[in-house]
Image (cartoon, rainbow, N blue to C red):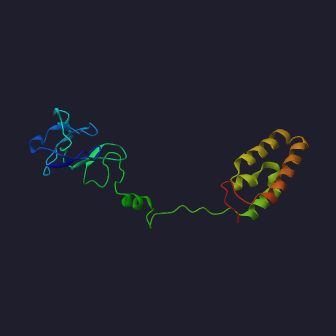
Amino acid sequence: MDAECPQCGEELQADDTLVGQKVKCPSCNHDFVLSSPQAGILPAMQSTLPALPLSKSQSPLGNIKICPFCSEQILATAHKCKHCGEFLNPAMRTAMAKPLPNAPQLVRTAKSRGIYIILGLFLGGLFGVHNFYAGRYSSAFVQLLIMFFLGWIVIGIVINTIWVLIELFAVTTDGNGNPMS
């Protein structure tokens, strides 16, 4: 009977009397149970059967194969691995990776550059609020710390004011790198 090794895929010939017995592939030395085309053998029975050597002309039936993703035994006719959940057919794998047409999509709105400038002019020199609005949290936090530690002396206000004026002209993107509208 014609068969195939589930590990390496080697085409082998096996005697019909070896059906249901544990055999060893001569190419890869993989132990597996030789099963008939009509019925498979339960995996629990595989460990109780003795390993028999299999010549190059012998092979198991191709009703069990190895998952290329997790190396577990699965049915040869399986479209999806029952162990790792991966689709075995590349076309099905790419089709399932695409979002469904009616699936909700995350929409991000652009931050307004006008609001960024207004917040920078009125509250930026004191607290860095314009950077919190734009998602530039590290700059906003540093400006807040400068104001907290140096604001009680005038130098903190001067540093933040100069920094804010430079940012109002130079910064055109939000914290994620998206351009502000």
Query: x, y percentage for residue 69?
Result: 37, 46
Relative height, residue 2 to residue 101 (above, below): above
Residue at the farthest front position: 56
Say whether residue 18 is left or right of residue 156.
Answer: left
Residue shown at 10%/45% (left/top)?
A: 16
Query: x, y percentage for residue 135?
Result: 68, 53
Q: Is 76 in front, or is 156?
A: 76
Residue at the farthest left position: 17
Say whether residue 173 is left or right of residue 27.
Answer: right
Q: Which corner quadrant of the image does residue 99 belong to?
A: bottom left
Q: Is 141 in front, or is 123?
A: 141
Q: Is 179 in front, or is 84?
A: 84
Q: Is 20 in front, or is 124?
A: 20
Residue shown at 38%/58% (left/top)?
A: 90
Say whether residue 106 is left or right of residue 80.
Answer: right
Relative height, residue 104 to residue 163 (above, below): below
Query: x, y percentage for residue 181?
Result: 70, 66
Relative height, residue 151 to residue 134 (above, below): above
Residue shown at 75%/48% (left/top)?
A: 139
Query: x, y percentage for residue 103?
Result: 45, 64
Residue shown at 70%/48% (left/top)?
A: 137
